[in-house]
Image (cartoon, helix red, strand yellow):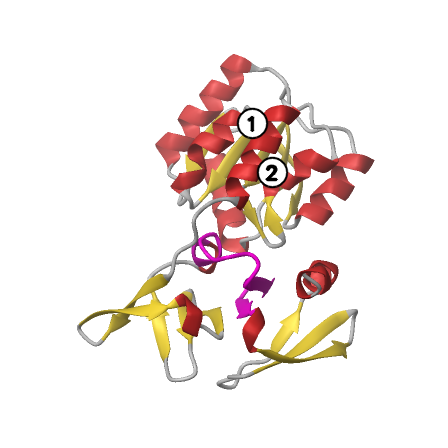
């Protein structure tokens, strides 16, 4: 059984592989991809695998965009931390939808369903366009609940300069404070306005309004100067440079 994993979180990809071994799923791993761009290139140049595990939120956007660029004819099991995408995942004919973190029993049930169905993916592009339009119209949040002493406070989205992850902890930074956010970076990004915020790499999200300077950086990357830094360097990853430039042009 040839399997491809599309997942931008190294920890999640490793956990999935360990669970597949624990449920004694006999498979050959073809690769682990972490971006839409890399995935599209792989599908264009390789024979379709027997099964794909695909995260919905990738480093450079939603994995649904892959279907707009290549025609896939293979079963897919979607994995994600965002339960609001469940119905959307089913609408594009996934074999099953798994909510992270994965568990042994749930994965076994998904694999059993896959073995029973044994049918290729048949993509309905009309449904796909509906899904993408729905995603773009999703109402964005205006505040984030953050830890404040022994209690909580609300951090206004309009005040955010950037958000970053360090040692598995997510922080939101404004001109006046740094606060712990009880969500992963991907979870936060999925609820922010894509016109106002951009995830420049695996560990940082920046607000467009707070970018003061953009410079060329080695290895085809970009370096940003933000209005508030707090000892952070802001480097746009090579995979995201073109998308970032397009985002800044809007």
The one of 91 and 232 positioned closer to us in this rendering: 91
> Foreground residue, 237 or 105?
237
Q: Does the magenta stretch include residue 7?
A: no
Which quadrant, please, contains the N terminus? top right
Residue at 44%, 30% in the rendered image: 87
Answer with the quarter of the image where residue 102 lies.
Answer: top left
Quadrant location of the C terminus in the rendered image: bottom right
Q: Tell me: residue 136, above or below residue 126.
A: below
Instruction: Give the quarter of the image for residue 142.
Output: bottom left
Residue 55 in the image, given as x and y percentages of width and height = 54, 42
**1 and 2 marks in contact (CB < 8 Å):** yes
The disc at residue 64 is: 2
Query: What are the residue bounds of the magenta stretch?
Result: 187-207
**Crowd around label 2: few <14 · some 14–19 · many ≥20 (10 Å):** many
Disc marking residue 92 = 1
Residue shown at 65%/50% (left/top)?
A: 35
Measured in 3D between alpha carbons, the distance from the residue under mark 1 to the one under mark 2, in whole angstroms, is 8 Å
* Picture residue at 41% right of the left edge, 71% below the top: 171
Q: Given the current orientation, which residue lies at the most extreme left position?
A: 150
Name the N-terminal-most of marks 1 and 2: 2
Graded by Cα atoms within 10 Å as few (under 14), some (14 to 19) or many (20 or more), the crowding at tag 1 reads many
Residue 21 visible in the picture:
no
Question: Which x, y percent locates residue 134?
Answer: 51, 38
Q: Is residue 143 above or below residue 232?
A: above
Q: Which residue lies furthest to the right in this view?
A: 45
Say left or right for 103 vs 220.
left
In this view, the residue in front, 13 or 182, is 182
Q: Dot 1: what SS?
A: loop
């Amino acid at each position: 059984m040839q399997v491809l994993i599309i997942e931008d979180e190294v920890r999640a990809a490793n956990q999935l592989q360990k669970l597949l071994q624990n449920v004694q799923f006999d498979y050959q791993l073809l690769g682990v991809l972490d971006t839409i761009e890399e995935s599209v290139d792989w599908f264009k140049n390789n024979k379709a695998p027997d099964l794909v595990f695909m995260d919905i939120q990738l480093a450079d956007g939603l994995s649904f965009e892959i279907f707009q660029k290549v025609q896939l004819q293979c079963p897919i099991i979607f994995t994600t931390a965002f339960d609001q995408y469940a119905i959307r995942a089913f609408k594009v004919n996934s074999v099953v939808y798994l909510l992270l973190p994965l568990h042994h029993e749930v994965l076994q049930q998904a694999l059993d369903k896959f073995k029973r169905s044994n049918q290729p993916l048949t993509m309905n592009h009309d449904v796909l366009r509906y899904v993408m339009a729905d995603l773009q119209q999703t109402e964005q949040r205006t505040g984030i609940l953050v830890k404040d002493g022994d209690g909580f406070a609300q951090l206004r989205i309009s005040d955010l300069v950037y958000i970053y992850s360090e040692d598995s902890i997510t922080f939101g930074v404004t001109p006046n404070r740094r606060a712990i956010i009880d969500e992963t970076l991907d979870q936060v990004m999925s609820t922010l306005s894509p016109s106002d915020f951009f995830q420049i790499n695996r560990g940082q999200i920046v607000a467009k309004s707070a970018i003061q300077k953009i410079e060329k950086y080695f290895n085809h990357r970009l370096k940003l100067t933000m209005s508030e830094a707090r000892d952070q360097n802001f480097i746009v990853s090579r995979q995201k440079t073109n998308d970032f430039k397009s985002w800044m042009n809007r």
